[in-house]
Image (tube, grey):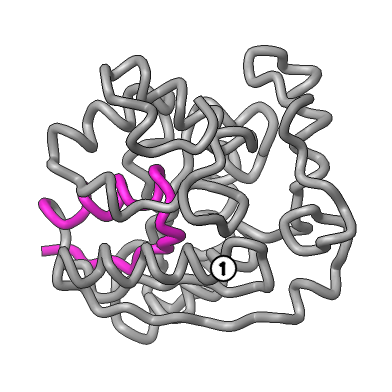
Amino acid sequence: MNSAVIILSGGLDSSANLALAIDQLNVKMAITFDYGQRAAAKEIQASKALCKHYGVKHKILSIPWVGEFGKSALIDTSIEVPTADVKIDDTSASTKSASKVWVPNRNGIFLNIAAGFAEAMDCDYVIPGFNLEEASTFPDNSKDFIQSLNGSFSFSTANKVQTKCYTIDMMKTEILKISMEKKLPLELLWPCYFAGEIWCGECESCQRSKRAFKANGLDLKKYFKTI
């Protein structure tokens, strides 16, 4: 059986990939990154609970130097996280709001670190949580990005680690549907940019999740502060 290292944030996409990988691969480890993001504690808590649920080894990696890049509302609390002005159905508006939460080379850094662990553990794959819906506003969520990384890893890893993502061609609604079929414990997730008591329902990540939850007939009041 092929093996993998998962990059796990506790959000819907990465958690769905964990649930899907468990059935097909030997998941040797899940890595959660603490880069000084607002929701770090919640993401770690969610990821830890998910790894316990699935019986997967969990590693938390602190990379605070990513915060030195600045300019992202996810890290810099002096920059407001877009909420009211987020329009997930407007590509132009989404691109503008996405720029506020963009962390320079974040996914590139995550995947290169994970590929190092994958090589050291003799794993075939690193698995991030990407999706089709956000690929247009976050190019490091795209299939082209994965293909480019795989070309790079064929040189930078001795065992030619590859990036694999089960949800790369899926919209959030599809990801949630398959997650429910796989009985992913949704109550353990943390898809929100903030670290409140419950998911805010207003940030872009929550708005996309909220639309998917509604489309799949779930009770929004159970999960989101603002519906």
- Does the magenta portion include 172? no
Image coordinates of residue 211 in percent, x first then y, are 46, 21
Q: Quadrant of the N terminus?
A: bottom left
Indicate left or right for 44 with 56 as reference.
right
Image coordinates of residue 100 in percent, x first then y, are 82, 43
Q: Judge whether 129 appears above or below 167 on screen.
A: below
Indicate left or right for 66 with 135 as reference.
right
> Considering the numbered disc 1 on the image, is that residue within a helix, a strand or a loop?
helix
Most extreme residue toward the bottom is: 120
Indicate left or right for 202 with 81 as reference.
left
Front-most of 174 and 78? 78
Image coordinates of residue 178 in percent, x first then y, are 22, 31
Q: Judge whether 192 appears above or below 37 on screen.
A: above
Q: What stretch is highlighted in magenta?
A: 1-23
Image coordinates of residue 224 in percent, x first then y, are 45, 36
Determine the image quadrant of residue 138: top right
- Does the magenta portion include 12? yes
Front-most of 180 and 162? 180
Determine the image quadrant of residue 137: top right
The residue shown at (26%, 17%) is: 217
The residue shown at (64%, 60%) is: 108
Which residue corresponds to mark 1?
Answer: 40
The residue shown at (16%, 64%) is: 54
Say which amino acid is labelled 1.
Ala
Determine the image quadrant of residue 56: bottom left
